[in-house]
Amino acid sequence: MDLYDELPEPPRPPAPAGSTPDTAPTNGNASGKRKAEPCDSEGTHQEKKVCKGMLRLKAHVAERRGEREELQDAHTICYDVTQECEPVPSDISRLSYFAVFDGHGGSRASRYASQHLHRNLVKKLPRGEGSSVDKGIKKCFLEAFKQTDEEFLKQAASQKPAWKDGTTAICVLVSDNILYIANLGDSRAVLCRMNEETQKPTVLGLSREHNPTQYEERMRIQRAGGNVRDGRVLGVLEVSRSLGDGQFKRLGVINIPDVKRCPLSDSDRFVLLACDGLFKAFTAEEAVNFVLSHAQDHSSLAEEGPADMDARYESACHRLANEAVRRGAADNVTILIVQIQH
């Protein structure tokens, strides 16, 4: 089994003549609760150099109920989860986590996952000197998803009547300048990477949808004794992997996420995480271009500071959610944009 599904390496700018390539890993702290710069004043010269290359992150979120009676989605924004991971693995200095959960049948599964999945994940990360997040991250994600699902199902089964809630999940763990993406169901994550020559965006899909109409998903469901009707498990459930949905677990609906890895670069602008409510109204390319058109007005970028750019992305996030509803997205719409600051 591969360690993870590898995404394309970021473009490498040509090194100036006579320079020596910097092969040191990039480290630092996240924006938000902990400042990315400056580094610890007692750090070594190499640590200061490394921290300087850390890409800063700023998250923006917008939620809309659409035509539903309630908002069943949830999300998590944690700029710094290292406090729950002591001692921190020796090869990293930043751990940030962002996630969107698209609930169905109620909001209890999505809320539970938003509160517990990252904590279960962090508890399983390797600790201390000589450990490596990169080598063990896929196993950690698999175990965290399994634990979160089993604990929620146990709680759901103890209720009278039993809860039937379920949720998709799209999660991004940022370890220094590396993204690790894990997903269940049909929520998605995409990365906006600019082509420095053409100044046009390349849209990289960071996740794979799990629908019962897909051949491998359908075969697993049928082998477990279920069936797919009208594109849904038993004609009811629209996804083939999820957290919760206890009544479908014996029918091949599983809690095993896809896990991908993607290094960040100076060409990257933002990561967009969203439930399928957005993508029923926008293609990934349309959504990325919409955000860029509202967030990056090149005529005024030179005069603006970081706070102005933050406000532009915040506004773009809400405008995108509003436009999805205006286009007829009947479902809940939750959008989380992780702005990459240089």
Image (tube, helix red, strand yellow):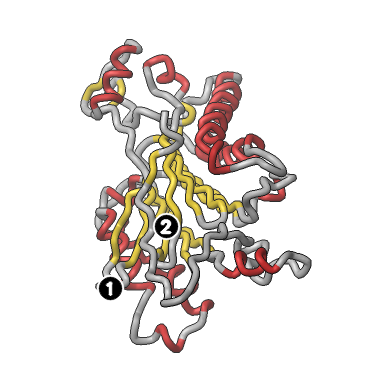
- Residue 154, picture quadrant: top right
Q: In the image, what residue occupies the spot 55% across and 29% down?
A: 143
Q: Residues within 10 Å of mark 1 (few under 14, many from 20)?
A: few
The circle drawn on residue 271 is 2
Question: What element does badge 1 sit on?
Answer: loop
Amino acid type at circle 1 is Glu
In this view, which residue lies farthest toward the front?
A: 18
Question: In the rendered image, is residue 70 in sight?
Answer: no
Question: What element does badge 2 sit on?
Answer: strand
The residue carrying mark 1 is 197
In the depicted structure, whether residue 304 falls above or below residue 99: below
Image location (x, y in percent) of residue 237: 34, 28
Image location (x, y in percent) of residue 48: 66, 68
Amino acid type at circle 2 is Val
Q: Nearer the viewer, residue 2 or 199?
A: 2
In this image, 319 relative to 45: left or right? Answer: left
In the depicted structure, whether residue 236 falls above or below residue 98: above
